[in-house]
Image: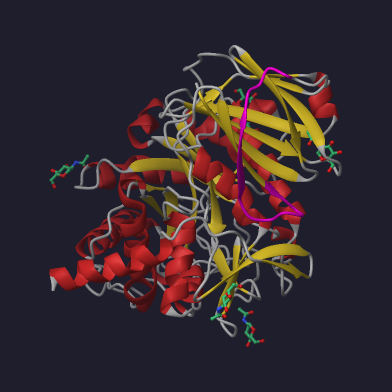
Amino acid sequence: MKNLVSAFIFVVCVKTISGDSPCVSRDVEYGRVCVCNSTYCDTVPQVLNLASTEYQLYSTSAENIGFHASTGKFSGNARSTSLSVTVPEINKNGEVIMGFGGAFTDTTSYDILSLSADLQEFLLQSFFGKDGIEYTINRVTMGASDFSLRAYSHCDTKDETLGKFALQDEDLKYKIPLIKKAQAIRGEEFKLFLSSWSSPVWMKTVEDFRGTGVLKDEYQALWAEYYIKFLTAYREQGVEFWGITPQNEPYSSPDWNINLLFTYESLRDWILEHFGPAIRNSSFKDLKIMLLDDTTIHLTSFQNTTLSRKEIYDYADGIAIHWYQNDKNQESWFNFPENLFVLGTEACQNVNGYLSNMMVRLGDWSRGVDYVNDILYDLNHHFNGWIEWNFALSNVGGPSWMNVSLDAPVIISEARDEFYKEPMFYVLGHFSKFLVPDSVKLDITTSDALSAANVKAAAFLRPDDKVAVIISNQSNNPVTVQINIAGAVESIDFEANSLNTLLYNQ
Ligand SMILES: *[C@@H]1O[C@H](CO)[C@@H](O)[C@H](O)[C@H]1NC(C)=O
Ligand SMILES: *[C@@H]1O[C@H](CO)[C@@H](O)[C@H](O)[C@H]1NC(C)=O
Ligand SMILES: *[C@@H]1O[C@H](CO)[C@@H](O)[C@H](O)[C@H]1NC(C)=O
Ligand SMILES: *[C@@H]1O[C@H](CO)[C@@H](O)[C@H](O)[C@H]1NC(C)=O
Ligand SMILES: *[C@@H]1O[C@H](CO)[C@@H](O)[C@H](O)[C@H]1NC(C)=O
């Protein structure tokens, strides 16, 4: 049996590690996508071993979607240009990258499983494989979220002993099989964190998955125990978690959405009295607990009520932030305690149209640019990583029991047995692929003309001693940027509306 299994894995690998496969692009309603079918899917060209004066450049643009790699030399023949980026020689004190990823929701898992087996494999390889964009930190929904096909918990019948707790088809048939395949593809770097939307309704003051329900006083301890039941059940299925958030959007979830509402004080107290001790006093005590899991509009109050209490640090490893409603001008929001890491834990397009049907805008480059701007801003403000929401959805941006609809980096056509990699996929890929875990942010200097030209840049030193310089050209014209590194200089042309990653040896 074991031999059969490894023979199967071997066959699957041989098919996908077939050298560099370029994007097969298609013009669609709002721009361009790359198309994957059961016999073909594009890959990311390999990162090469470079000589000391060489660089490798990966480019993606609205015009040339996909990953396009080339190599060049720092020749010293810099052309005169007012746009410049200067990368310091050594600087190992910056923020450390933990990782990038997406969410295994019920809907995403269901959609992926609607594809033929070969195409499912291409999709997982695209996100997790060595020839793909190598997602690292991924979220898993516990029970129903807005991106499920029905509203449910693991103990819908009232049972104060949780004896009737049981994993559901969403776990056993959808998420767990896909998670295990993704993990086998990604290997040791693969990390999962868990988030919940609602408790069973009988634990709530309003007996509904939606509405204004809070936890009933008598179930405060039981709801913490439920998490341990869930973590144990997944462990029994061979899935281990790395992290957890106590509650998805505890403060800002609207009453029409699936939720479990808390005040700043009630969540702090539940974590201190129940959730924190339950986790730390279990065999799951090493889980990274990430607080907030909500938007930045709550940060000041959260700091005042929760982070100001020193006992909370027994139960806090990081802060989880959602990208919605963020006013990026409020720098003061980002005074994070030094001992906590910061992850973006949810992002998606286009939340304003979420209640209308059809929020997919296939091929829309500007949706990728929104991601670039948010990720670059966040990485410049103490974030250690960035995780989006559903990493794949159907061509109507669902399905969902709430009839809501969103866009995603990969859109699936079950009818045509194809999937489409959107600009968002490649944009996220530049970060997830090239800013490998433990890369350190460098303090670059840029010319004033650079930002005036609508060009943004960031640089990171990777653990393999390669420097990754990310250049985002958001102008409608090509630009030339002079890159100054220790002892060398080069002027490089970048396409209009492009995202580029330059790699060279430190
Ligand atoms: C998949 O796409 C490739 C490249 O466009 C094409 O050659 C091939 O015929 C397609 N296969 C199927 C099953 O449609
Ligand atoms: C941890 O569990 C032990 C054994 O069940 C119990 O005696 C102890 O009070 C618990 N500690 C906390 C902090 O909950
Ligand atoms: C937070 O605390 C500061 C200082 O005590 C206070 O000035 C501010 O109004 C508080 N903000 C909120 C949102 O509670
Ligand atoms: C979703 O749409 C279907 C079909 O129109 C309708 O029957 C159902 O009540 C809707 N569900 C919600 C939660 O709005
Ligand atoms: C970026 O693109 C814009 C518009 O497409 C163009 O005007 C600008 O020159 C480009 N800049 C760089 C650095 O490539």
Is 11 colored magenta in this rendering? no
Q: Nearer the viewer, residue 237 or 456?
A: 456
Q: Position of residue 320 (x, y in %)?
A: 50, 42
Q: Is residue 179 left or right of residue 501?
A: left
Q: Position of residue 33 (x, y in %)?
A: 68, 64
Confirm whether residue 207 shows in the render: no
Q: Is residue 356 left or right of residue 404?
A: right
Residue at the image position 27 percent from the left and 62 percent from the top: 234
Residue at the image position 71 percent from the left and 59 percent from the top: 350
Q: Nearer the viewer, residue 25 or 273?
A: 25
Q: How is the image coloured?
A: secondary structure
Q: Position of residue 178 (x, y in %)?
A: 37, 67
Query: Split into 4 quadrants, where in the image is the N terminus?
Result: bottom left
What segment carries the magenta color?
60-77
Residue at the image position 72 percent from the left and 47 percent from the top: 369
Above or below, 220 relative to 144 = above
Q: Quadrant of the rendered structure where residue 380 is?
A: top right
Above or below, 20 relative to 155 = above
